[in-house]
Image (cartoon, rainbow, N blue to C red):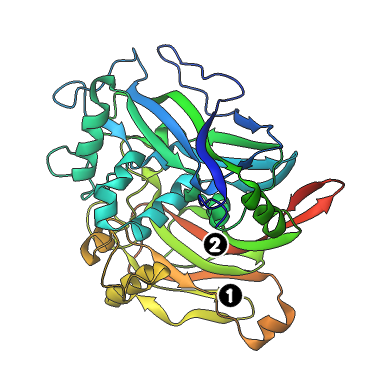
Amino acid sequence: MFRSNQYCSRYEETAIQLDTPLIFPGDNARQNKNGYQFTINDRSSYFDWFNGFFEVKFIVNQLDGGGGYAGTGAPTNATMINGSTSLINNLNIKQNGKVVYDGNNLFLTTHVKSLIEYSGDYARSIATDEFFYVDITNTPSKDNNYGFSERLDATKDEKEVSCIIPLNRYSFFKSLETNMLPPSQIQINVTLTDDNILIYKTDASEVGRVVIRKFVLWIPRMIYNSTGLSYVMKNYMIPTNWTYLREMVQTLNNINHVDNNFRISPSILNPKYVFVFFQRSDKINSQNDNPYLFDTFKLNAADNNCHLQSARLSVGNGIYYPEIEYSYDNIARIFKAVNNYVYKQNDKNTGSLLTLKNFRDLYGMLFFNISYKNETDNITNDPKEIILNYKLSVASTDPYTIYSIVLYEQTVKVDVLGNELILYT
């Protein structure tokens, strides 16, 4: 492997600062969420992007007056929603001025993946450096909600939180575990997440904000010995290509249909997996609700009488996934399918954070594996239309929104242009 000490004489993390410094907002002002850029102009060094990370320090306080939240009594309890990746909404990556990756609503994608990919042991230990503390109830309470309580304790009284955001939580960088970017100019543009999504609190009268105090990119630089340089030039600094699963988030907003179709995509090439979840629309963009708690199996706020009753996908030319639709009467089947995204259903040595109970009450979602192709697909390889067909148990008293996350195959090509290796996607 190109990062081993067999080939590297040194392997050390290098700090990359923002192109322009952070600006800290005064009272009654929010921190700007746009225009954060890191530029790497070192065209002679080799970097291990898979193991890179953002170092972040932030505080949580009140918009009016900038005071902290005490965690007991007044002011009310408030903290950030789960995970450091919540801070990032959009990443735009350019190589030599050409866009090679762009992703929006990434805080949702990383959250869904973390729920399934992280084991309980990993979440309680290593993932805490990502400010990851999963909620176990649907209330912002420090008494019976482990996740909220841990995050509140970390942020109360304007305490500064230090955490990391691993680059490999994003699909483009994850694909670089076994692949290498050629030495070139790399620009990473970051759009932060809005405060109304980030804050989770108990009192509607006190508006909160998240203020980032430090934002640095760390990337391991690999300095090769003669054997390593020969190995890298022969195996990686050549025209090549690889594929990875890129994400796309689509929504259907503020509806109240009992029986409906959601056209997730009119035309997408090489879709592989689809996640779907429902939320009451009044929870979205509100500091008094948590966007990471899903309402798929409880669409009415007061009771459970309205829920997703059945669903399946129509893909391409009338091919249905699953062939026998998902049903509320067999949530265990849906739960099994979600865990099979990372093959944990039959892995006896680890597990996910999801249990059948919290899946039903807090994190209900659907998962569709549409990676299998019929003979016609193999011949034409045409883009696919994806439609969710679903039915609720009864009419919802609250408007709801449907979220879909489509993971589709993206090809990265590295080719020679002049005397440089250029990426194409």
**Where 367 falls versus 166 (above or below)?**
below
Instruction: Answer with mark 1 or mark 2, whichever residue precedes in sequence.
Output: 1
The residue nearer to you, when weighing 129 against 15, is: 15
Q: Which amino acid lies under the numbered mark 1 shown in the image of this protein?
A: Val
Quarter containing the C terminus: bottom right
Q: Position of residue 29 (x, y in %)?
A: 45, 17
Q: Which amino acid lies under the numbered mark 2 shown in the image of this protein?
A: Leu
Q: Residues within 10 Å of mark 2 (few under 14, many from 20)?
A: many
**Where 25 falls versus 211 (above or below)?**
above
Inter-mark Cα distance, 1 to 2: 14 Å
**Which residue is located at x 69 percent, y 32 percent?**
41
Q: Position of residue 217 (x, y in %)?
A: 52, 33
- Give the label on residue 24, or none: none
Can you identify the residue that label 1 sits on?
A: 315
Q: Where, by quadrant of the figure, is residue 112 drawn?
A: bottom left
Q: Residue furthest bottom?
A: 375
Image side of residue 181 versus residue 83, left or right: right
Residue 248 appears in the rendering = no
The reply to whether callout 1 and callout 2 are in contact (CB within 8 Å) is no
Q: Residue furthest right?
A: 418
Can you identify the residue that label 2 sits on?
A: 407
Residue 38 appears in the rendering = yes
The residue nearer to you, when weighing 365 against 374, is: 374
Q: Position of residue 65 (x, y in %)?
A: 33, 12
Q: Where, by quadrant of the figure, is residue 278 drawn?
A: bottom left
Mark 1 vs mark 2, foreground winner is 2
The residue nearer to you, when weighing 95 against 318, is: 95
Label 1: element kind: strand
Quarter containing the N terminus: bottom right
* Total marks placed: 2
Label 2: element kind: strand
Q: Position of residue 18 (x, y in %)?
A: 57, 25
